[in-house]
């Protein structure tokens, strides 16, 4: 079945550092790929998405490119801020009945001054 | 806008007790979902619904029942709670319109359940 593998956290960075969170996936067909973010005490929010190979999703300075050849969707940001501290989830799906998503285990990011 | 609202936010149960979590959405969404979030396991789908009066099993449905009697509400029931059901439960909704914003789920703030 479908699955998503994310790098384990927590990831601790200094403010203005470069961020990469790795995500690889296994799926049949051509799923859409997503990054969701969960701030402390809140539910998940969609951060960005890509619906086909070579698409780049971007939002709030974050980017991720749908790489079919490497089955990856790595999240990047050039300069992180303390306010980016959260848990980031990679997910795939949306292609079959029910629009069900399969989530990775999440990566906690801590940004320090 | 309220979006997706879950009640209660916190609950402590004893093994064998029953309870119901309520999810309400005010966006006229067709699809609704219940996920559980556990450390190191991410989010796992319990049950979902693609419209009023319909329900379907997700990845981890055992020990839970659901009902979608009204479009805006999706109830998650635990008939006989077990410690393994200690978790944070999230409800989510999706518009369901064909081809519209695939995968863009709206989540509630979560309900933390502890079973002793």
Image (spheres, coloured by chain):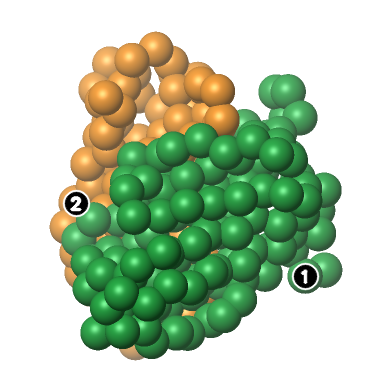
The reply, left or right, for residue A49 in relation to residue B29 is: left
- The quarter of the displayed image where residue B63 is located: bottom left
The reply, left or right, for residue B38 in relation to residue A58 is: left
| Helix, strand or loop status at disc 2 | loop
Picture coordinates of residue A92, whole percent (x, y): 41, 34
Q: Is residue B94 visible?
A: yes
Q: Relative to the observer, which residue lies in front, B48 or B38?
A: B48
Picture coordinates of residue A40, whole percent (x, y): 44, 79
- The quarter of the displayed image where residue A48 is located: top right
Q: Residue at x 33, y 70 (%)?
A: B81
Q: Is residue B114 above or below residue A69?
A: below
Q: Is residue A49 above or below residue A46?
A: above
Picture coordinates of residue A82, whole percent (x, y): 42, 80
Find residue A7 and name its label: 2
Q: Report the residue marked by disc 1.
A: B2
Q: Residue at x 27, y 38 (%)?
A: A4
Chain coloured orange here: A
Picture coordinates of residue A19, whole percent (x, y): 32, 58
């Amino acid at each position: 079945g479908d699955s998503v593998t994310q790098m384990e956290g927590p990831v601790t960075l200094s403010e203005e550092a470069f961020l990469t969170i790795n995500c690889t996936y296994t799926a049949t067909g051509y799923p859409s790929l997503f990054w969701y973010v969960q701030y402390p005490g809140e539910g998940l929010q969609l951060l960005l998405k890509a619906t086909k190979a070579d698409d780049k999703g971007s939002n709030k300075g974050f980017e991720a490119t749908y790489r079919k050849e490497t089955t990856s969707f790595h999240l990047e940001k050039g300069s992180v801020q303390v306010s980016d501290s959260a848990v980031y989830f990679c997910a795939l799906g949306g292609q079959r009945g029910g629009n069900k998503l399969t989530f990775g285990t999440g990566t906690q990011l801590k940004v320090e001054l | 806008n309220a979006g997706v609202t879950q009640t209660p936010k916190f609950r402590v149960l004893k093994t064998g007790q029953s309870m119901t979590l309520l999810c309400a959405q005010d966006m006229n969404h067709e699809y609704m979902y219940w996920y559980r979030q556990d450390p190191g396991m991410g989010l796992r789908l319990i049950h979902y619904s693609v419209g009023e009066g319909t329900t379907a099993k997700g990845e981890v449905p055992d020990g839970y029942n659901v009902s979608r009697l009204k479009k805006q509400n999706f109830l998650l029931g635990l008939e006989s709670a077990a410690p393994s059901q200690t978790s944070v439960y999230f409800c989510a909704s999706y518009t369901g319109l064909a081809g519209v914003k695939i995968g863009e789920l709206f989540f509630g703030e979560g309900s933390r359940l502890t079973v002793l």
